[in-house]
Image: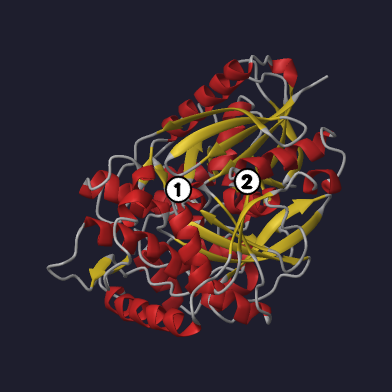
Amino acid sequence: MSKYVLALDQGTTSSRAILFDRGGHAVATAQREFEQLFPQPGWVEHRPEDLWSTQSAVAAEAMQLAGAVAGDVAAIGITNQRETTLVWDRATGLPVYNAIVWQDRRTAGLCDELRAAGLEDLFRAKTGLLLDPYFSGTKLRWILDNVPGARERAQQGELAFGTVDTWLAWNITGGAAHVTDASNASRTLLFNIHTGDWDDELLTALDVPRAMLPEVRDSSGVVGTAAADFAAAGAPLAGMAGDQQAALFGQMCIRPGMVKNTYGTGCFMLLHTGEQAVPSKNRLLTTVAWKRNGRMEYALEGSVFIAGAVVQWLRDGLGIIKSASDIEALARSVPDSGGVYLVPAFAGLGAPHWDAYARGIIAGLTRGTNSGHIARAALEGIAYQVADVLEAMAADAGFDVTELRVDGGAAANNLLMQFQADLLGVPIARPRVLETTALGAAYLAGLATGFWTDITETAEHWQEERRFIPSTSADLRQHLRAGWNKALDRAKAWQE
């Protein structure tokens, strides 16, 4: 009898593989970072080969750590950095260009052109998204327009497009499956979230040939079988979801009104809205949460582009910490930020501001400012962005959020979590398992193959590890937010 579900978590800076047992416990974990490429200011790329080689390697490593053989794996689930765009040759499987990462800003001008042509309302109505370089559609258009011969080859059906889930599925199955799930498809600007299919009017607007597109499948359901050269050869590939939707599922936010925030490279807050696609009046995104048993469920989402990445910048760019985990001690070396605000708009601003031309800024510096103040301001900059999103989300939902479930690497930082609770005036619930993104992918795959009987069983696995209760006065909260808004105004529209 199979013992595990293998979750593949292909993130922005690293690939992870985790084996989960029937109790939802992580039995073995392996992780490898890969190189980030910055060919020009505002451009971010990955080598597609790196995404696959690191993901394949950590799958084998996790299996080895657990002493598992292929027959021990009941199912494979994929979760992935979303919107990152790849195009490859169907015959050879070789990419025609590097993966253009979700953080990449090169198509800001194209988004401006589409907006000027009066197309924003069309995209908003059909996809639930805004016209922003963040999403896959304009990245795909850039590849077709800028890689010699790509458009002609795409029109002849020779090239395949995919987000990272599609690229992994293709490689895991030895090229047999060219598929995506509804949650990833809903992030491309090409998918109609109401009809559940690629949309010809959107394809025409972005000049993308339909022949390139993968088949859209349920987020929970068998789409293929792992090829002989993969660590879990013969196991069914049975779950696929974008990382934030997978985290929503892993947090068991399965009822309308439940909300989670993931603190990863970016920060992503999702509010489950059930089978209703709720349009946002506050510049949030309406997105597919997942598709199960042929039924689509939806969420409102607020995306913050730079969260944990600011900690990496303090480590790699400024060198004021040796490892990411050092930031909490450095930030605690001062009682507060000393009036310093750090707006980490390194890749523009996401929800609810949507300013592709904003850039990072540190404001309020004095001669008394030290590295502790900057570290603290960096952590607080994450929390302020989350507060902006939650405020917009509560306005869209029409009710106050009473609890925020958190996950992701930076959710382990107690100083950040307490400041977040103080800033929101809302309790923060941190679960025992912080790897809820991978867990969500495992649940989707395991439910599709009978490894878990139903969603009631998986919901019983969720346990709170710690609750952070707000301890700040409303006046201080208001004062802090006012300072943040001043810094934010100075960061906006920086780039010409």
Question: In the rendered view, would you say 51 is above or below 217?
Answer: above
Tag 1 residue: 151
Q: Are marks 2 and 1 in contact (CB under 8 Å)?
A: no
| 386 sits to left or right of 435 | left
Q: Nearer the viewer, mark 2 or mark 1?
A: 2
| 372 sits to left or right of 246 | left
Which mark is first along the chain, 1 or 2?
A: 1
- Identity of the residue furthest to the left in this view: 367
- Identity of the residue furthest to the right in this view: 453
- Any part of residue 230 in sight: no
Q: Could you give the CA–CA distance between mark 2 and mark 1, rounded to whole angstroms?
A: 39 Å
Tag 2 residue: 436
Residue 109 x, y percent position in the rendering: 35, 67
Report crowding for label 2: few under 14, some 14 to 19, many 20 or more residues within 10 A (C-alpha): many
Which of these two is toward me, 47 or 208? Answer: 47
- Image quadrant of residue 404? bottom right
Disc number for residue 53: none
Residue 403 x, y percent position in the rendering: 65, 67
Which of these two is toward me, 423 or 334? Answer: 334
Helix, strand or loop under label 2: helix
Report crowding for label 1: few under 14, some 14 to 19, many 20 or more residues within 10 A (C-alpha): many
The residue lying at 43 percent from left, 59 percent from top is: 305
The residue lying at 49 percent from left, 62 percent from top is: 418
Residue 363 x, y percent position in the rendering: 24, 72
| 2 sits to left or right of 176 | right
Helix, strand or loop under label 1: helix
The residue lying at 79 percent from left, 65 percent from top is: 275
Question: In the rendered view, would you say 96 is above or below 245?
Answer: above
Which corner quadrant holds the C terminus? bottom left
Residue 316 x, y percent position in the rendering: 26, 44
Which of these two is toward me, 410 or 396? Answer: 410
